[in-house]
Amino acid sequence: MTRFVVLLRGVNVRGTNMKMADLAELVRSLGYSDVKTVLASGNVVLESTDAASAVKETMQTALRQKFGYEAWVQVLTTSALEKIVAGYPFERGRDGWHDYVMFTEKDETRDALLAVELDPELERTAGGKGVVYWTVERGTTLSSALGKTMGAAKFKPWLTTRNVNTLDKLLK
């Protein structure tokens, strides 16, 4: 059995609403074990003998059927997520700042986000394997240069963002 973290994109924002109890029930009905949801933003931890790609396909299909939205998920092993969190290059927990990881399934998406011209007084990025690390001044997340860029429709299937504190909770 492999322990996976499944990150749903766009849950409980902009009209895509679901209860985490309903999500957990759906995931269990798919045959996955040791299922738990973390927070109300579409984070699932589960165990499976399937490959990550199979979990991804199964989850996206089931979410689309059950909740009626264009579901995109990213699936990582917990060991891969541990490495990503350990690789966060910025000082964590600075007063007045948020610490994020953007999970990008395509190198083109990662490269496009890293190419955005930023004001380093308000936000900074660094690249990693399949991720963009981002630190941004609190209160400017959505209005920052990167915040505006990452919301583009062309990135929806390939990008989801989590606060590093949330990632820590997923690893417990």
Image: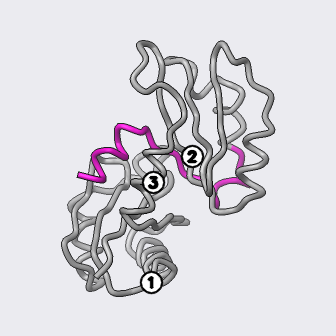
User: Quadrant where the N terminus lies?
Assistant: bottom left
Magenta segment range?
152-172
Residue 116 in picture, x, y percent from top left = 78, 34
The reply to whether the magenta stretch includes residue 158 is: yes
Question: Which one is earlier in the sequence, the residue at label 2 or at label 1?
Answer: 1
Q: Which residue is mark 1?
A: 51
How many callouts does the rendering have? 3
Q: Which mark is residue 102?
A: 2
Secondary structure of the residue carrying numbered label 1: loop
Secondary structure of the residue carrying numbered label 2: strand
- Distance from the alpha carbon under mark 2 to that under mark 3: 14 Å
Nearer to us of marks 2 and 3 is: 3
Tell me the quarter of the picture where residue 142 sits: top right
Question: Residue at coordinates 52% horizontally, 45% vertically from top-left?
Answer: 161
Identify residue type, mark 1. Ala
Question: Residue at coordinates 33% horizontally, 56% vertically from top-left?
Answer: 18
Question: Residue at coordinates 73% horizontally, 53% vertically from top-left?
Answer: 109
Give 127 or 70, whichever is nearer the viewer: 127
- Distance from the alpha carbon under mark 3 to that under mark 1: 19 Å
Identify residue type, mark 2. Met
Lateral position of residue 81 relative to residue 44, left or right:
right
Lateral position of residue 172 relative to residue 15, left or right:
left
Look at the magenta stretch and give its main secondary structure.
helix
Identify residue type, mark 3. Lys
Q: Which residue is mark 3?
A: 83
Residue 125 in picture, x, y percent from top left = 65, 33
Can residue 40 be seen here? The reply is yes
Question: Residue at coordinates 43% horizontally, 52% vertically from top-left?
Answer: 11
Nearer to us of marks 3 and 1 is: 3
